[in-house]
């Protein structure tokens, strides 16, 4: 299992760790892009974002992208639209919008 995850995320900080300990980490799904069935998507208002990174930490799919300046974005290929990031954002900077 560890070797599998290290293969999926070869250059991540987890790659060495998972070879030493039996940990699992969020990884992009092997079942295809979730954007194909997502009903709602999170939209980030960067003018409200305070760069607390709670969304980046709490996203269960690891699809919040952290930029070098700690601003955040969404990887819409793999976001499943669960809304956790919008619920947890303390600045109300993320809104869920219907797809299509
Ligand atoms: S809606 Fe869910 S999967 Fe998508 S970025 Fe937010 S927490 Fe992650
Ligand atoms: S939780 Fe909200 S305020 Fe914090 S980094 Fe994410 S979008 Fe910005």
Image: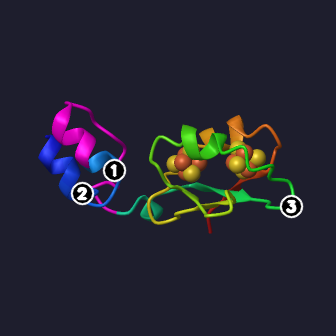
Residue 22 to residue 16: above or below: above
Left or right placement of residue 45 versus residue 30 in this view: right
Q: Which residue is mark 1?
A: 27
Q: Nearer the viewer, residue 26 or 82?
A: 26
| Residue 58 is covered by the magenta coloring | no
| Mark 3 and mark 1: Cα distance apart in space | 29 Å
Q: Nearer the viewer, residue 15 or 61?
A: 15
Residue 67: which quarter of the image? bottom right
Residue 47: mark = 3
Q: Position of residue 31 (x, y in %)?
A: 27, 56
Mark found first going from the N terminus, 3 or 1: 1
Q: Quadrant of the C terminus?
A: bottom right
SS state under label 3: loop
Left or right placement of residue 18 versus residue 77 in this view: left
The residue located at (79%, 37%) in the rendering is 90
Left or right placement of residue 87 versus residue 33 in this view: right
Answer whether labels 1 and 2 touch (C-beta < 8 Å).
yes
Answer whether labels 3 and 2 touch (C-beta < 8 Å).
no
Q: Which residue is mark 2?
A: 8
The residue located at (79%, 50%) in the rendering is 93
Could you tell me what secondary structure mostly forms the magenta stretch? loop
The residue located at (38%, 63%) in the rendering is 33
Label 1 neighbour load within 10 Å: few <14, some 14-19, many 20+: some
| Residue 22 is covered by the magenta coloring | yes
Residue 58 to residue 71: above or below: above
| Mark 1 and mark 2: Cα distance apart in space | 7 Å
User: Residue extending furthest bottom?
Assistant: 100
Magenta-colored span: 16-32
């Amino acid at each position: 299992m560890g070797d599998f995850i290290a293969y999926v995320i070869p250059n991540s900080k987890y790659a060495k760790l998972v070879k030493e300990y039996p940990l699992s980490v969020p990884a992009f799904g092997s079942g295809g892009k979730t954007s194909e069935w997502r009903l709602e998507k999170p939209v980030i208002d960067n003018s409200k974002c305070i760069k607390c990174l709670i969304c980046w930490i709490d996203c269960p799919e690891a699809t919040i992208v952290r930029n070098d300046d700690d601003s955040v974005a969404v990887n819409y290929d793999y976001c499943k639209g669960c809304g956790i990031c919008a619920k947890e954002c303390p600045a109300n900077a993320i809104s869920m919008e219907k797809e299509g």
